[in-house]
Amino acid sequence: MADPASLSTLRTLYNRAARSFLNRDNSQTYALLDSAFALLHPPYTFQDDDQLAEQRKKWDILRITLETTIRSSSSGGGKIMLEPTNTLINSWYTRSLELFTPQSQNGKSAVQRDVSCLPTAVLTTLMYSSIKLDCANVGRDMAEDWLAKRSPSRNDGYSKIIELFCLQILPKLREWEYAEEFLTFEHELLLETREVS
Protein backbone atom coordinates (compact mmCIF):
# COMPACT_ATOMS: atom_id res chain seq x y z
CA MET A 1 0.00 0.00 0.00
CA ALA A 2 1.46 3.37 -1.01
CA ASP A 3 1.81 6.16 1.48
CA PRO A 4 -0.64 8.96 0.46
CA ALA A 5 2.05 11.58 1.16
CA SER A 6 4.45 9.78 -1.21
CA LEU A 7 1.81 9.68 -3.94
CA SER A 8 1.13 13.39 -3.53
CA THR A 9 4.86 14.16 -3.57
CA LEU A 10 5.38 12.06 -6.70
CA ARG A 11 2.56 13.85 -8.52
CA THR A 12 3.95 17.27 -7.60
CA LEU A 13 7.49 16.27 -8.55
CA TYR A 14 6.28 14.87 -11.87
CA ASN A 15 4.69 18.17 -12.91
CA ARG A 16 7.95 19.96 -12.11
CA ALA A 17 10.05 17.31 -13.88
CA ALA A 18 7.89 17.41 -17.02
CA ARG A 19 8.22 21.20 -17.11
CA SER A 20 12.00 20.98 -16.63
CA PHE A 21 12.23 18.39 -19.41
CA LEU A 22 10.23 20.56 -21.81
CA ASN A 23 12.46 23.52 -20.94
CA ARG A 24 15.53 21.34 -21.61
CA ASP A 25 16.82 21.79 -18.09
CA ASN A 26 18.42 18.34 -17.95
CA SER A 27 20.20 18.77 -14.61
CA GLN A 28 16.96 19.83 -12.88
CA THR A 29 15.07 16.97 -14.54
CA TYR A 30 17.69 14.47 -13.34
CA ALA A 31 17.53 15.88 -9.80
CA LEU A 32 13.74 15.45 -9.78
CA LEU A 33 14.06 11.93 -11.21
CA ASP A 34 16.45 11.04 -8.38
CA SER A 35 13.97 12.38 -5.82
CA ALA A 36 11.12 10.41 -7.39
CA PHE A 37 12.97 7.09 -7.67
CA ALA A 38 13.95 7.39 -4.00
CA LEU A 39 10.19 7.00 -3.32
CA LEU A 40 9.47 4.37 -5.98
CA HIS A 41 10.16 0.68 -5.50
CA PRO A 42 9.16 -2.49 -7.35
CA PRO A 43 5.77 -3.94 -6.43
CA TYR A 44 5.76 -6.67 -3.78
CA THR A 45 3.34 -8.98 -5.57
CA PHE A 46 1.40 -9.34 -8.80
CA GLN A 47 -1.50 -7.21 -7.64
CA ASP A 48 -4.12 -5.10 -9.36
CA ASP A 49 -4.37 -2.50 -6.58
CA ASP A 50 -0.75 -1.31 -6.72
CA GLN A 51 -1.16 2.44 -6.21
CA LEU A 52 2.37 3.22 -7.37
CA ALA A 53 1.96 1.43 -10.73
CA GLU A 54 0.93 4.55 -12.65
CA GLN A 55 3.68 6.63 -11.05
CA ARG A 56 6.30 3.96 -11.81
CA LYS A 57 5.22 3.94 -15.45
CA LYS A 58 5.17 7.74 -15.88
CA TRP A 59 8.53 8.25 -14.22
CA ASP A 60 10.24 5.43 -16.09
CA ILE A 61 8.98 6.74 -19.44
CA LEU A 62 10.22 10.23 -18.56
CA ARG A 63 13.63 8.86 -17.56
CA ILE A 64 13.99 6.80 -20.77
CA THR A 65 12.83 9.74 -22.90
CA LEU A 66 15.27 12.15 -21.22
CA GLU A 67 18.19 9.76 -21.61
CA THR A 68 17.32 9.04 -25.25
CA THR A 69 17.10 12.77 -25.96
CA ILE A 70 20.48 13.39 -24.33
CA ARG A 71 22.10 10.46 -26.14
CA SER A 72 20.72 11.56 -29.51
CA SER A 73 21.98 15.13 -29.03
CA SER A 74 25.62 16.00 -29.37
CA SER A 75 26.07 17.85 -26.09
CA GLY A 76 26.51 16.84 -22.46
CA GLY A 77 25.38 13.54 -21.07
CA GLY A 78 28.48 12.25 -19.26
CA LYS A 79 28.24 8.45 -18.98
CA ILE A 80 25.27 8.39 -21.40
CA MET A 81 27.57 9.66 -24.15
CA LEU A 82 30.43 7.24 -23.36
CA GLU A 83 28.76 3.82 -23.30
CA PRO A 84 28.12 1.89 -26.53
CA THR A 85 24.51 2.45 -27.55
CA ASN A 86 23.43 -1.19 -27.45
CA THR A 87 24.91 -1.56 -23.94
CA LEU A 88 23.14 1.59 -22.83
CA ILE A 89 19.71 0.56 -24.13
CA ASN A 90 20.11 -2.93 -22.66
CA SER A 91 20.90 -1.35 -19.29
CA TRP A 92 17.73 0.77 -19.51
CA TYR A 93 15.74 -2.35 -20.34
CA THR A 94 17.22 -4.24 -17.36
CA ARG A 95 16.55 -1.27 -15.09
CA SER A 96 12.90 -1.16 -16.20
CA LEU A 97 12.51 -4.91 -15.69
CA GLU A 98 13.85 -4.53 -12.15
CA LEU A 99 11.46 -1.64 -11.47
CA PHE A 100 8.33 -3.54 -12.56
CA THR A 101 9.08 -7.15 -11.58
CA PRO A 102 7.41 -7.91 -8.22
CA GLN A 103 9.61 -8.50 -5.19
CA SER A 104 9.16 -10.92 -2.33
CA GLN A 105 8.57 -9.56 1.17
CA ASN A 106 12.27 -9.95 2.06
CA GLY A 107 13.24 -7.57 -0.76
CA LYS A 108 14.70 -10.18 -3.08
CA SER A 109 13.30 -10.76 -6.50
CA ALA A 110 10.27 -13.05 -6.19
CA VAL A 111 10.70 -14.13 -9.79
CA GLN A 112 13.41 -13.61 -12.32
CA ARG A 113 13.06 -10.27 -14.11
CA ASP A 114 9.86 -10.65 -16.06
CA VAL A 115 9.24 -8.78 -19.32
CA SER A 116 5.52 -9.59 -19.08
CA CYS A 117 5.39 -7.22 -16.07
CA LEU A 118 6.47 -4.24 -18.17
CA PRO A 119 3.62 -1.89 -19.07
CA THR A 120 3.17 -1.68 -22.84
CA ALA A 121 3.92 2.06 -22.75
CA VAL A 122 7.33 1.43 -21.14
CA LEU A 123 8.22 -1.36 -23.56
CA THR A 124 7.20 0.71 -26.59
CA THR A 125 9.20 3.68 -25.27
CA LEU A 126 12.26 1.44 -25.01
CA MET A 127 11.62 0.08 -28.52
CA TYR A 128 11.23 3.61 -29.95
CA SER A 129 14.49 4.57 -28.21
CA SER A 130 16.25 1.66 -29.89
CA ILE A 131 15.03 2.94 -33.27
CA LYS A 132 15.94 6.57 -32.57
CA LEU A 133 19.44 5.57 -31.43
CA ASP A 134 20.02 3.25 -34.42
CA CYS A 135 19.97 0.07 -32.35
CA ALA A 136 16.82 -1.54 -33.69
CA ASN A 137 18.40 -4.96 -33.10
CA VAL A 138 18.07 -4.33 -29.34
CA GLY A 139 14.41 -3.36 -29.86
CA ARG A 140 13.92 -6.58 -31.80
CA ASP A 141 15.38 -8.61 -28.91
CA MET A 142 13.05 -6.87 -26.43
CA ALA A 143 9.98 -7.48 -28.61
CA GLU A 144 10.85 -11.14 -29.21
CA ASP A 145 11.49 -11.66 -25.49
CA TRP A 146 8.10 -10.12 -24.70
CA LEU A 147 6.31 -12.16 -27.38
CA ALA A 148 7.86 -15.39 -26.10
CA LYS A 149 6.88 -14.79 -22.47
CA ARG A 150 3.56 -12.97 -22.54
CA SER A 151 0.30 -14.51 -21.46
CA PRO A 152 -2.14 -14.43 -24.42
CA SER A 153 -5.07 -14.01 -22.04
CA ARG A 154 -3.90 -10.58 -20.85
CA ASN A 155 -5.08 -7.38 -22.49
CA ASP A 156 -1.55 -6.08 -22.78
CA GLY A 157 -1.21 -3.94 -25.88
CA TYR A 158 -0.34 -6.85 -28.14
CA SER A 159 -1.37 -5.07 -31.34
CA LYS A 160 0.77 -2.01 -30.46
CA ILE A 161 3.87 -4.16 -29.89
CA ILE A 162 3.28 -6.10 -33.13
CA GLU A 163 2.73 -2.90 -35.10
CA LEU A 164 5.98 -1.40 -33.83
CA PHE A 165 7.87 -4.67 -34.29
CA CYS A 166 6.68 -5.43 -37.84
CA LEU A 167 6.24 -1.95 -39.29
CA GLN A 168 9.18 -0.11 -37.76
CA ILE A 169 11.81 -2.32 -36.14
CA LEU A 170 12.04 -5.13 -38.71
CA PRO A 171 12.00 -2.70 -41.68
CA LYS A 172 14.75 -0.64 -40.00
CA LEU A 173 16.78 -3.87 -39.91
CA ARG A 174 15.80 -4.56 -43.57
CA GLU A 175 14.07 -7.77 -42.53
CA TRP A 176 11.09 -7.39 -44.85
CA GLU A 177 10.65 -11.11 -45.47
CA TYR A 178 10.63 -11.91 -41.76
CA ALA A 179 8.04 -9.18 -41.12
CA GLU A 180 5.85 -10.51 -43.93
CA GLU A 181 6.21 -14.10 -42.74
CA PHE A 182 5.46 -13.10 -39.14
CA LEU A 183 2.28 -11.28 -40.17
CA THR A 184 1.22 -14.15 -42.44
CA PHE A 185 1.14 -16.53 -39.48
CA GLU A 186 -0.19 -13.97 -37.00
CA HIS A 187 -3.63 -15.19 -35.92
CA GLU A 188 -4.12 -13.40 -32.60
CA LEU A 189 -3.92 -9.95 -34.20
CA LEU A 190 -6.44 -10.99 -36.85
CA LEU A 191 -8.85 -12.20 -34.16
CA GLU A 192 -8.37 -8.97 -32.21
CA THR A 193 -9.14 -6.92 -35.34
CA ARG A 194 -12.31 -8.92 -36.06
CA GLU A 195 -13.53 -8.44 -32.46
CA VAL A 196 -13.12 -4.66 -32.77
CA SER A 197 -15.03 -4.51 -36.08
Image (tube, grey):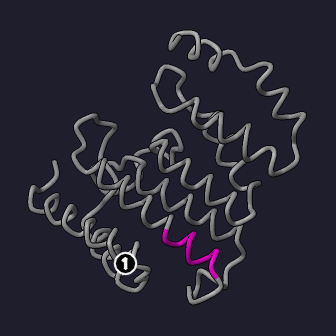
Residue 122 drawn at (x, y percent):
48, 50
State left or right for residue 142 relative to residue 154. right
Majority secondary structure in the magenta region = helix
Q: Residue at image x 56%, y 16%?
A: 192
Q: Is residue 70 magenta?
A: yes
Residue 41 drawn at (x, y percent):
31, 59
User: Could you say which is closer to the camera, residue 194 or residue 127?
Assistant: 194
Residue 50 drawn at (x, y percent):
25, 43
Location of residue 100 with respect to 20 vertically, above or below: above
Q: Residue at image x 70%, y 71%?
A: 85
- Label count reads 1
User: Could you say which is closer to the camera, residue 112 or residue 95?
Assistant: 95
Where is mark 1, residue-wise?
Answer: 29
Location of residue 191 with respect to 38 vertically, above or below: above
Q: Could you say whether the residue bearing mark 1 is in a helix, strand or loop? A: helix
Q: Residue at image x 15%, y 62%?
A: 6
Q: Is residue 83 magenta?
A: no
User: Could you say which is closer to the camera, residue 171 or residue 114?
Assistant: 171
Residue 172 drawn at (x, y percent):
80, 51
Q: Residue furthest left?
A: 5
Classify residue 93 by image quadrant: bottom right
The magenta-colored residue range is: 66-73
Classify residue 89 by image quadrant: bottom right
Q: Amino acid at mark 1?
A: Thr
State left or right for residue 60 relative to residue 3. right
Neighbour tally class for label 1: few under 14, some 14-19, many 20 plus, Cα within 10 Å: many
Q: Residue at image x 16%, y 47%?
A: 1
